[in-house]
Amino acid sequence: MIPAARLASHLMAAVGLASLAATGQIWMPLLAAGGVGLIASLGMDVARVRGAIPAPAANGLIVVALAFAAADYLWLSPTLLQVGAHLLVILMFTRLRHADSREYLQLVVIVFLQILASAGMTFPGAFAAGFVAYLVVIVWVLMHYHLMAEAERSDAHVLTGAAPGGIGRWALAAAAGALLVTGILFVFLPRMGFGLLVASPQSDIRLSGFSPHVTLGAIGPVKRDPTVVMRVSGDVGPGREPLYLRGAVFDAYDGRQWLNTAPVRRLILPDADGRFALGRIPAGSTSYTVRLEPIDSAVLFAPARTVAIDGPFPAVAVDDQETFGVPYPARARIAYDVWQRPAAGPPPGQAEPSGRLARHLSFDGSEAVARLARDTVAGAASPGDRARAVERFLKTRYTYTLDVPGGEDQPIEEFLFRRRSGYCEHFASAMVVMLRAIGVPARLVTGFLVQEWNEFGGYFIVRQGDAHAWVEAYLADVGWTRFDPTPPSPPADRPWTGPVEHYLDHLRAGWDRYVVGFGLGDQNEALQRLETAWDASRVGLAGAVAKGRTLWRSAGAIGPAAWLAIAAGLAGLIGLAAIAARRPWRRFFAVRLPTPRIDFYARLVETLSRHGLAKPAGTTPWEFATRDAAHLPWADEIRTLTSYYYDVRYGRRTLGTAERRAIDAALSVISRPTDKSPARTRPRTR
């Protein structure tokens, strides 16, 4: 049988290793070696191992671990937190052979630090399951540590066998209480926000297409990347108008790349509500919440006609093309709210100046492109009709593909006249150039097309593959208007586990929102809800008391059936009180101790009595062995049998076959007749 204390400690170590493995940032060969060592050490003979491995060799392992940590920091791991996690795995292996309470406690501390490290590196909600498992196991482990330490202080070896029955139930009860207290403290303790152990769960996501100049074809390589960039919630849902989140706008094309020739931005000051607003938020505005993953860009993604942004930013800047940004990349997850005014034309007094429109009329294409544009819009009278004609032409006459060679000298001409296929950048760039050729101001916009709905969390998932490019054309009566000439792309290959993936993403998002991102504002909101519920309960209680008084006054009008129901209810309450007084749940938590096999001690007392030495009723077994029977020729055997008796009777130790044979041999020696009578050799007492 594996000793319970050793089983508990190894289960705790397994939880620590699993928590580190869940981060996905720990060196897998090291985790595999730790797992093998964990399994191998579970059934080892601790005494034999300690004798085989001298103390200097064990300390040498620690020195090797520190040397590995130094090399890990210099050449292998990118963060200090990962270096510490690797070192903890090695140190854990050196303490799995624990033979005393000191090493047992050291293992407890090492695993605790592993859980702490995994909390700093884990962003999926899987950490919650690991933390709950650790909380249950650590209570069990600490109970064993206390018993082991007490046994060592009393110089007894009573914990080498099975643990006392019922300790697991008490561990579960204590863990449930600890979870309750932890939850209360988590909600009500003030958020400090130091972030000492917070590490980015992944390197910053590298985005393409949002710098001041972008080479045509920059978005294509990321269209196959499923990495989640953000999640969008709020006034969204399936079946509504597609949501386009703008990131960058380009007004100049030099034949191979797009440029933003007016990147000058102005700072927006927060208003009285703490929002960064371009003006008053009109009635009927739509609001969204964007939860952005760590990215390598300072862009704030927002839809067209954004009038206000609210988030944890030191400042927000906007340019004359209404793209938003922050002073520097956040390097961490951020959440911000966006308000979008209704699509009812340009805001009063905000018509586009003619000088600014001139930037969006510069034509850098060939004469062949201009001729194609004029032929495409033949018969279209208004700028809006012309824009829709070009959009329809590109969407119906060309095909979508991601297999496009790069490095072309004239990518737009190659797309329009020879290849006749491409992806969103080619379609949007061609439309901008064609509209400018016929006198319609146009610009290229890059961002994300929001389209993957998570049915479990009620939000949209935006991935790298959702990066998109589209066109904004200026129409005098409505302002800048979006056009998307890209034909529908083939649906992404989603595995049959799509719903499972969405549910797991919902769990991750909930963990990030309500655990990692739980802040002071959430605490204030929780306290306000609690106060509101308390006030409502007081009002409800007062109403119930008033109704009770009214009912009592009209008791004379109550019929026999109602009185019978009241009597039945009172009888039920009395019955519940009687059951509670008997406390039947004590059976669950009762410590069920195994029946010890101590018949050998009764045989010892009986044998000594036949020899003439009876055990006094008020004498303990140890006093009887070391004082009353110390003069007997079998004194050593008596003390040995008494020690076994203490181990089995009070330590609940299960004796092995060899120990049983030793007990039988000692009893056989004591049972032999001898010339020395105990009665004659017993010392006199005064």
Image (spheres, rainbow, N blue to C red):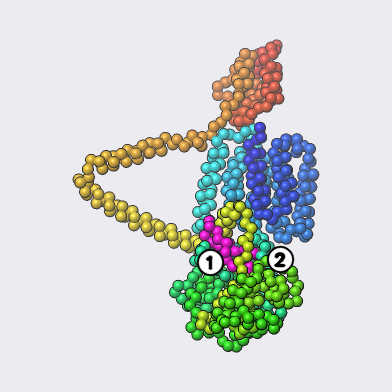
The one of 288 and 651 positioned closer to us in this rendering: 288
Indicate the quadrant where residue 678 lies. top right
- What's under tag 1, amino acid-wise? Thr
Residue range of the region highlighted in magenta in the rendering: 449-473
Q: Please name which of the two marks, 1 or 2, marks the residue nearer to the observer.
A: 2
What residue do we see at 68% from left, 68% from top?
Answer: 220
Query: Residue 635: x percent and y percent?
Result: 68, 22
Q: Main secondary structure of the magenta part?
A: strand
Please tell me how crowded label 2 is: few (under 14), some (14-19), or many (20+) other residues with Cα within 10 Å: few
Q: Secondary structure at mark 1?
A: strand
| The C terminus, quarter of image | top right
What residue do we see at 70% from left, 22% from top?
Answer: 662
Query: Residue 156: x percent and y percent?
Result: 65, 33
C-alpha distance separating marks 1 and 2: 34 Å
Q: Which mark is residue 403?
A: 2
| The N terminus, quarter of image | top right
Query: Residue 177: x percent and y percent?
Result: 51, 46
- What's under tag 2, amino acid-wise? Asp
Q: Is residue 542 left or right of residue 197?
A: left
* Residue 485 in view here: yes
Q: Which mark is residue 289?
A: 1
What residue do we see at 63% from left, 19% from top?
Answer: 604
The one of 685 and 499 positioned closer to us in this rendering: 499
